Amino acid sequence: MTLIKKLYVKIAILLLITGCVQPKEATHQSLANQTLPMLLDFKDLTTTTNGTHSYQISPDGKKLAWLKDSFDNNGNPYTALHFKNLATGETGKFDGWISFFEWMPDSRNLIYVPNFDDMKSKIFFLDTEHPTRHIKPFYDGNNQVYVVDILKNDPDNIIVRHNGTDPKVFNLYRLNIKTKQETLLFEIDDKLAIDGFIINNSVKNGSVFAYIKNKKEIYQLSTGKLLFDAGENGKVSHAMLNHKKNTLSILANNETDKIQLLELDLTTNNITTLYANDRVDVDLYYSDNNLNPAIAFSYPDYQEAKAFHPAYQKLLDKFYSKGKNSVLIFSRDRNNEKFTLSQYNDHGFKVYLYDTVTDKKELLSQSKSHYYTQYLAHQKPIQFTSRDGLNINGYLTLPNSIKAKQLPTVLLVHGGPHARDYWGFNTEAQLLANRGYAVIQVNFRGSAGYGYDFISAGYGEFSKAMHNDLIDGIDWAVKQGISDPNNIAIMGASYGGYATLVGMTLTPDKFACGVDIFGMSDLELMINNFPEPWKRHEDIWQNYIGDFNDPKMKQQRSQQSPINFVNNMKAPLLVIQGEDDAVVIPEQSRRFVEAAKKAGKDVQYWEMNNTGHHYGTPTQTKKLARKVDNFLSQCIGGRSAG
């Protein structure tokens, strides 16, 4: 064989291995004669221009740390932790995969707490003065560990909860990071189920000031006094002690439907409403270095913000504009002078280091999508009325530069279900819109963020009213002339995967195909394999699917389990599952696929190796996107990257 022939053979083999194929043109009639924007690749929307992200300023404001996408000697991707002295410019790096981190109060060490697919955890402390030193983890991986408080006045200790003695019980401990010794601070028992703790971190070693019981009551530990009660249907989402003012900052209902930001004066018992939105819950807030509320956010459609601290107001004035640019704060120094933050919209994000004293901002990173802004779609808030009169919110993303009439459509369902979709840069929605699809995201009843009445309207409504809201969403789009009723796909992960299976089996005439990503097919199988660490949250699931021990509820769950209606399927289905998923176990997908194939249904199945309840490694995520791309192209006629 000649050298040239050998070269051609090697090229051919390489093309086969890498799967290089030609893009496929759109076939749907609404797209065939229109000029779609430039075809974007998965990496165009899921990477940054310099491969960096997750920037954090140190508490003393003198160092910056971040993650950078890297490759090992075998070409496998991973994220490495880098850091820099802002005064000298000196840099350093920790080898090994680190996916997130936080600075310790000493501004020298960083903490990394990975949670593995088997729901176990470890804690690593990383010393910036010895980045090449071998790091030994705290705990042996047999616990699930949560960091409750990194004590700002005590660099030697942190407060953690873990289930080392009982998988269902998360006791509270003080952990000394130098000696690895832990001290039991609070032992949980069945008579006193604790949902959270409020730590007084103004004192060295930290102490427990109060605990949250029944998700709605705050009790002072030392006296047992009831300090706050959110009401019959209330919920305390977050609470923090301001020792100097003797107040509690609380996210809670306080006898109202929506969660508000409140301040409780512990001396007078007076409650002041600091921020409320009559349309939605207050979503989150940040505090300053004295633990005073500094800024709060809500999301009725676009982001809304209210600042209580001049430095945070200055930040808003610089970066925030409702409906145009939103803000996500990553970190601040202890003087509230330097911040790392993301300024984002529906086309991408930019990450800055911002100094409020000098009013200077430094661009640290930005999404690669900024190169392709002219080709990207806009995500617009929508609102419609459900068949039983409930006000439903969501988002609509339409392909750029073409007429939005009778388009093939993807109903993209969020997980949870006690979660919600937000306005912003959504890579899935952008990729789908770039292929020519209208993308509908519905915050159906049972979704979080819209008050107690709205979330409780979903209780007991799996496959019923919750699903009707999704159907009403696509019916709304059809009535608007946006969607082709004969070419609508349903797609989602976790609960979104369950909703996909419900759509394909209980409303099969509505969908031309579906993509289920680790969705539940059998609710009773889920209950029987409920992860042990999740059992302290069983009440949330029992709200949605009924008492686990009630025979009547078991019968209802049978009627809400798609696996029992697989014979109703009429359209193609793609099922994707992680083989190490401890949340939605592989049997959920395997049994459904087996039953569907036995019934002669058109179903494709891909089980991702070494992957839990997530999209896997960057390589696997890219492969997943390509599979979905080609599958949807075949069944509803958008284009694909091939």
Image: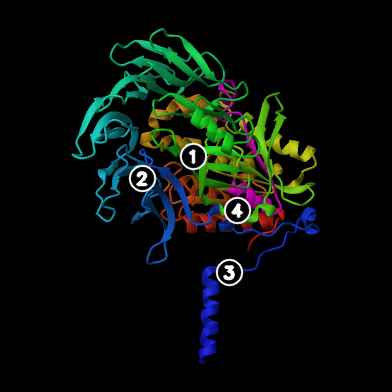
CA separation in Å, label 4 and label 2: 29 Å
- Furthest residue to the bottom? 2
Label 4 amino acid?
Ser
Q: Nearer the viewer, residue 54 or 13?
A: 54
Q: Horizontal and vertical percent for residue 243?
A: 35, 19
Count neighbours of disc 4 (C-alpha within 10 A) and say few if under 14, some if 14 to 19, many if 20 or more: many
Above or below, comparing residue 114 to residue 315 in the picture: below
| Relative image position of residue 641 (x, y in whole percent) | 63, 61
The label shown at residue 20 is: 3
- 183 to the left or right of 288: left
SS category of the residue bearing label 4:
helix
Residue type for callout 3: Cys
- Image marks 3 and 1: residues in contact by CB distance under 8 Å: no
Q: Nearer the viewer, mark 4 or mark 2?
A: 4
- In the picture of the structure, the residue carrying the numbered disc 2 is 114
The magenta stretch spans residue 441: yes
Q: Position of residue 380 (x, y in %)?
A: 69, 39
Q: Quadrant of residue 72?
A: bottom left
Q: Residue at coordinates 23% horizontally, 39% vertically from top-left?
A: 177
- Mark drawn on residue 369: 4
Observer able to see residue 358: yes
Q: CA distance from mark 3 to mark 1?
A: 50 Å
Q: CA distance from mark 3 to mark 2?
A: 35 Å
- State the quadrant of the C terminus: bottom right
The residue mark sitting in front, 3 or 2, is: 2
Q: CA gap, disc 1 to disc 2?
A: 36 Å
Q: Secondary structure at mark 1?
A: loop
State the mark number for residue 358: 1
Count residues near mark 2 (Cα–Cα under 10 Å), then give few for <14, some for 14-19, many for 20+.
Answer: many
The stretch of residues the image draws in magenta is 426-455
